[in-house]
Image (spheres, helix red, strand yellow):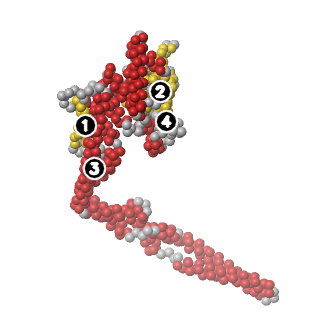
Amino acid sequence: MLVSLHVKNLALLEEAEVEFGSGLNILSGETGAGKSIIIGSINLALGEKAPKEMLRDQAEYALVELVFRVENKEQLQKLQEMDIYPEDNEIIMSRKITATRSVGKINSETVSASCMRNVASLLIDIHGQHEHQSLLHKKKHLEILDEFAGDKLNAKKQILRKCYQEYQEILQEQKQAVQDGEGRERELSFLEYEIKEIKEANLVLGEDEELEVSYRKMSNNRRIMESAGNAYEMTGGESSATEQIGRALHELQSAAEYDPDLRDLCGQLEELDNLLNDFNRELSGYMSDGEFDEETFYETEKRLDVVNHLKDKFGGSIEAVLHAKEEKESRLAHLQDYEQYLLQLGERLHKAEDKLSSISAEVSQIRQKAAKKLSKQVKEALVDLNFLDVNFVMEFADTGKYTANGRDEAEFLISTNPGEPLKPLGKVASGGELSRIMLAIKTILAKSDQIETLIFDEIDAGISGRTAQMVAEKMNVIGRNHQVICITHLPQIAAMADCHFLISKNVVKNGTFSNIVLLEEEESISELARMLGGVKITDTVLESAKEMKSLANAAKSTVSAKS
């Protein structure tokens, strides 16, 4: 529920703090006192567009802050899916507005306006005059029905959307196939050329790395041979290390005849002489085998060019080249067997359409069954709202095409007088009647609605007397299961308040300010008297207000006992 509203520097409100209660919260006040600013400020905090003119004159910024308490498990789960995590089961949504920009935050984290609207859609439902006017649009009627039908329909609609997507994908593939047919011969020839080019290369995984090593070695053959030759001269040639060690060994062996202690050193030097001789033989063999072969170098270079060309053309690696060949062979098979491919596409499309038709029919069947139930409940609710001889039904038509929402087109029809034929809402209902019809619908939807807070603005437009009393009773019923915030100018509705707020306008030092205060019981009765009698409140009017409040309290007690 909406716990509190804090507003600063917004239009006539310099600063205001409102703590809402559960049940029915009524906001009343004289015309022009600033009642609409309250709803406007809530809308701003929930991500609606922020007009610059709403910023109070000479103020640097305006601020609106809403605090919600969220305890419903389903709502908490949906919020978590949106990466929104309540702190101590509370969500703080705020909007700061300056002359150049506005910043929205949820729990001190900056978020986009669209994110704020998405979160708001889970927490609060604002019903204003524009919404009951939306009943004039048939699209809204189907939305209301689908909301009423609930989880059973939603599950089928998810399947429907998936089937529709599959159908559209195959349809698009078929269109593409027809376009492909126009350049089929040209593409066939090109694919055959590229596949042949890759096949003739006989690529082997890893050969590019081996070729690079061989090419680098052959490219530097002269330098390698020169270095190896120099090393050989130093270790095995004239005046080389081998010759010097041999002489040293001869000298040491001669001396060892006279001193046995030199024999170990002779052994070590002999081992070193053998090692160096082995090294010289291997180095000589390497030099013999490493003679530069012009033809081998040419073939290696040529092969490397082929491999690198294909890598550059088809993805940068031998793996990518071979994968490209597989894709092209698959595409070639499609084009070579083009008629069969088109036939298969047609069969797939036919199956997808059958599947889509079946689920669309199931969705329509659920809707039509739900529509009868909804129509009956709306009719009963309209009777409660002083539509005495009303008839209300929902008429269905086939759109003639598939959509992600099925093939249904639906419209509410109403007759408000005996003997009159059923007609579309827009051709029959007045503004006041539309607001009552929407209230009836909201009452029915509220029974299963997870959204805890409902706001009604101008729900009492065009009604008075007995009808106003019935609207008040209906608002009280909704308030037993939901938090309701309602702006009204009718005392019958205001009398039902669980929390009654007065919005007033005052002029201080040539400045105009709006204030909002929570009324005590006696203050609420005085406000009802003002709403009943205008400027001059007589004892009779005051007694009428007391009686109205007393009757409202009795009605509330009765509803509470039933629930």
Q: Position of residue 49 (x, y in %)?
A: 41, 31
Between 54 and 158, the one lying in front of the other is 158
Quarter assignment of residue 315: bottom left
Looking at the rendered image, the disc whose residue lies closer to the viewer, 3 or 2, is: 3
Between 360 and 23, the one lying in front of the other is 23
Q: Position of residue 65 (x, y in %)?
A: 49, 30
The residue where tag 2 is placed is 99
Mark 4 or mark 3, which has the lower sequence index?
A: 4
Looking at the rendered image, the disc whose residue lies closer to the viewer, 3 or 1, is: 1
The residue where tag 3 is placed is 359
Helix, strand or loop at label 1? It is: strand
- Residue occupying image coordinates x 56% and y 74%: 225
Point out which mark residue 69 bears: 4
Helix, strand or loop at label 3? It is: helix
Mark 3 or mark 1, which has the lower sequence index?
A: 3
The residue where tag 1 is placed is 394
- Residue occupying image coordinates x 49% and y 36%: 69
Q: In which quarter of the image is the C terminus?
A: top left
Instruction: Tell me the distance, in whole angstroms, between the alpha carbons under discs 2 and 4.
Output: 31 Å
Mark 3 or mark 2, which has the lower sequence index?
A: 2
Residue type (three-letter) at the residue carrying disc 2: Ala
Helix, strand or loop at label 2? It is: loop
- Residue occupying image coordinates x 32% and y 50%: 159
